[in-house]
Image (cartoon, rainbow, N blue to C red):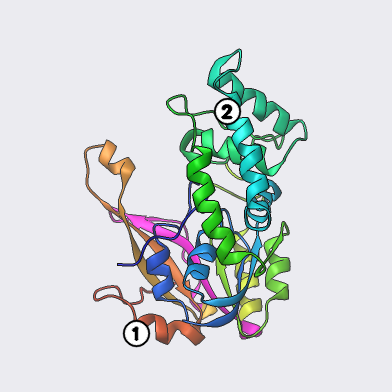
Amino acid sequence: MSVRAPHIVQYQGSKRLLAPQILKHMPRKFSRLLEPFSGMAAITIAAAKENRAEQYHVNDINEPIVRILQTAIDSPSALIGKYAKIWSEQFSHRDGHVGHFYSIRSRFNDGEQTAENMLYLLARCVKGAVRYGKNGNFNQSPDKRRHGASPKNIAKNIAAISAMLKGKAVFSALDYREIIGAAKAGDLVYMDPPYQGVSDSKGSSRYLSGLRFDKFCQAIETLNGKNVDYMISYDGECGGKKYGKSLPKELNCAKFLLNAGISAQATLLGKKTTTMESLYVSKSIAGAAEKFCPPGMKPAPLGN
């Protein structure tokens, strides 16, 4: 069994746990991996660990998140030093560690959107879940039961990630369509957009920016027209209930269902149900994806 790829900090919605299943459907070698909705770049890190691509493009509309990744990869020691200072201050803050979190959050919302401030907020907030209010301010609360990942633990992971990606990655905070527009044959685009039902064209309190279904489908058509390979984590199902609208058949890609494990929410309700997440794969690599698909996990119908 391969060792799980390192991660900088917990991040809700991260595909780190699903990465081994996703990589089974991914070509063994390609020139460049582009992640237009990178989050904390779990798939980029997992692919780099296996040396799948020569270059990587990490993009997310949330610029402070990208700033964490870029600083961690290009200047790991500097990031750890600054994070350690902030993390240590919580133990001597006059209002305690919770008050310290709110003071950093206020500084962040007042314009100090540095990599170290974002990293601390992410390490300390509830479930590692990034949330923004209608005014654009970070509004997630602290997890009062813990103090966040220690600098020592984060340093070890950052060092490993930097070693894999330094000199091979470029970073941006652009609209995903700009990244798709720059993709070319030989690239692989992996997309993990915000879940349907929690974002729309006007944005929401959960995400910095929304995503329109029709515009997203047009972007996929652009990739098809340029013969660019892609993989998309999009909708899913749990306990027989489907979440989100499937991508249309007209996009001509294959849909696989990945086992995301037992639903934590269902467990709280006394039920034991498995969450399945969809992975859409472009036609040109769908044959290889089906070849490596585990028994009983063949492509699911599209457009349902």
Q: Is residue 101 above or below residue 231?
A: above
Q: Which residue is mark 1?
A: 291
Q: Position of residue 194 (x, y in %)?
A: 55, 54
Identity of the residue furthest to the top in this view = 94
Q: CA distance from mark 1 to mark 2?
A: 50 Å
The boundaries of the magenta stretch are: 224-249
Q: In the rendered view, does 113 fall on the left or right side of 155?
A: right
Q: Is residue 8 above or below residue 163?
A: above
Q: In the rendered view, does 87 fall on the left or right side of 242?
A: right
Q: Which residue is mark 2?
A: 88
Q: Is residue 297 above or below residue 64?
A: below
Give the mark nearest the N terminus, 1 or 2. 2
Quadrant housing the N terminus: bottom left
Q: Disc 1 on helix, strand or loop?
A: helix
Residue drawn at point x = 26 percent, y = 41 percent? 267
Residue drawn at point x = 46 percent, y = 81 percent? 28
Amino acid found under the numbered disc labelled 2? Ser
Q: Position of residue 41 (x, y in %)?
A: 56, 58
Does the magenta portion include 103? no
How packed is label 2: few (under 14 Cα within 10 Å), some, or many (20 or more)?
some
Q: Is residue 46 above or below residue 198?
A: below
Residue drawn at point x = 52 percent, y = 28 percent? 142
